[in-house]
Image (cartoon, rainbow, N blue to C red):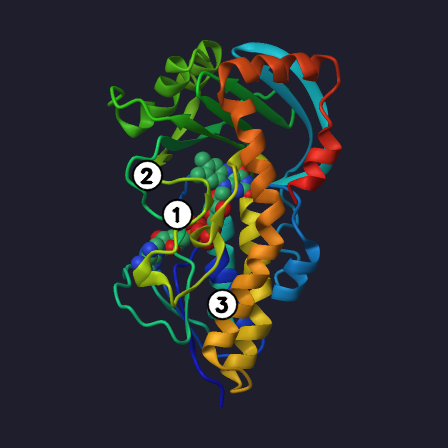
Amino acid sequence: MRKKITIIGGGLAGISLGIGLRRRDVPVKLIEAGFYPRHRVCGEFISGISTDALKYIGIDGILDGMPRHRTSVWYCQGKRSFQSDLPEEAVGVSRYKLDKDLVDRFEALGGELITGTRYTGDDSEGYVFSTGRVRRKGSKWIGIKCHLIDFPLEADVEMHVGKGAYLGVSRVEENRVDACGLFEIRPQIKVPKMELLETYLEACNLTEMSARVRNANKDESSCLGVNAFELGWQPDEPEDRDKLRIGDRFAIIGPFSGNGMSMAFEGAAAAIDPLLAYASGEMEWLDCRDQITLDLKKRFRKRLAISNAIHPFLTDAGKQRMLATLGKLNLIPYNTLFRALR
Ligand SMILES: Cc1cc2nc3c(=O)[nH]c(=O)nc-3n(C[C@H](O)[C@H](O)[C@H](O)COP(=O)(O)OP(=O)(O)OC[C@H]3O[C@@H](n4cnc5c(N)ncnc54)[C@H](O)[C@@H]3O)c2cc1C
């Protein structure tokens, strides 16, 4: 008889952990506020994925057949600046598809799924919180996303950096392209979600890209925005002190890295063994929680620090010009930075 683990939040971190535990015969209940399938604000560009982590969870093969990305082209403040091969192949898959595929696997493995329910309790023993971004008042960022249908691209990935913003555009499954970016909030912009992306692009002096998006065939249901979050370590509120947290609830890396989803998978993989030991009665809850927390801190410390250092080069106008110049001269240590962010 193993103790039950309750996972709060069914994004990538929570569902992956649920699958990993079910594969090891641990009873799991997963409580998710929303429903599947659903679109999420995410660049849907998976890079630096640890195949070991996917295997360990038991979801290797989940990305098979999805578009692969090898080339990128950078536009700085509306001008085509430089192109570069990605140091490592990346994968494009919509969260609409990925989260649904994973949750189907979780249920097929006997996991108990409760959707449409927002957990408000304060239990901590045997509970894992993978509830994603923490709402932070005064945050200056908004993430905006939209799927564009049959949208021509100049390379596998187009990166556009503009005034207080950057946007990544890359292919996902079928004939869809995901355009997703991080923008400094402009409170004066009040438009329907469908027009949010093109309006923000225009406001950031990315006029040509704004026109391309405006004229594109959009999937209206995929046009979304999220705000009130901060990058980096997520706050450990006094009422949360006892809680075990993974995924974005633990730490958020700059979206430009394309590594947030990989961190969600890695965090889930790292939590499996200690949770298995707890469920089998071989480890106390507090030891289990502390072991996982320490492991995640060690794993993610370096990449979060480097992501924070690079972030201004993508959002600050002066630094963007420096980025463009270095890129044209082929002086960006792409491979080194790429490895350091993983
Ligand atoms: C603009 C932007 C672009 C990005 N682009 C990329 C990219 O290209 N590549 C990449 O790898 N990463 C990217 N990311 C990061 C990536 O989306 C996240 O790292 C990843 O989604 C984290 O997964 P998660 O499971 O921790 O959280 P989430 O996917 O946010 O899941 C959390 C879940 O918890 C649920 N929940 C919350 N509270 C409760 C509650 N009380 N009760 C029940 N359920 C609850 C929510 O409904 C949600 O389903 C991007 C992020 C942003 C903001």
Q: Quadrant of the C terminus?
A: top right
Image position of 147 (left or right of 91): left
Q: Earlier in the sequence, mark 2 or mark 3?
A: 3
| Residue 186 point in image, percent of width and height | 31, 22
| Circle 1 residue | 133
Q: Amino acid at mark 1?
A: Arg
Question: Mark on residue 141?
Answer: none
Give the distance between the C-alpha atoms of the residues marked 1 and 2, in whole angstroms.
9 Å
| Circle 3 residue | 18
Q: Amino acid at mark 2?
A: Ala
Task: For marks 1 and 3, give the one nearer the viewer.
Answer: 1
Does residue 180 lie above or below 189 as drawn? below
Q: Residue shown at 54%/35% (left/top)?
A: 308
| Residue 286 point in image, percent of width and height | 46, 75
Number of residues whose C-alpha sits closer than 10 Å to that of mark 1, classed few (under 14), some (14–19) or many (20 or more): some
Q: Residue shown at 41%/15% (left/top)?
A: 204
Element under disc 2: loop
For the residues labelled 1 and 2, say whether their Cβ atoms are less than 8 Å apart: yes
Task: For marks 2 and 3, give the one nearer the viewer.
Answer: 2
Q: Is mark 2 within 8 Å of ligand 1?
A: no
Residue 136 position by quadrant: top left
Q: Earlier in the sequence, mark 1 or mark 2?
A: 1
For the residues labelled 2 and 3, say whether their Cβ atoms are less than 8 Å apart: no
Q: Amino acid at mark 3?
A: Gly
Q: Is mark 1 within 8 Å of ligand 1?
A: yes
For the residues labelled 1 and 3, say whether their Cβ atoms are less than 8 Å apart: no
| Residue 111 point in image, percent of width and height | 45, 72
Image position of 301 (left or right of 100): right
| Circle 2 residue | 228
Give the distance between the C-alpha atoms of the residues marked 2 and 3, in whole angstroms.
28 Å
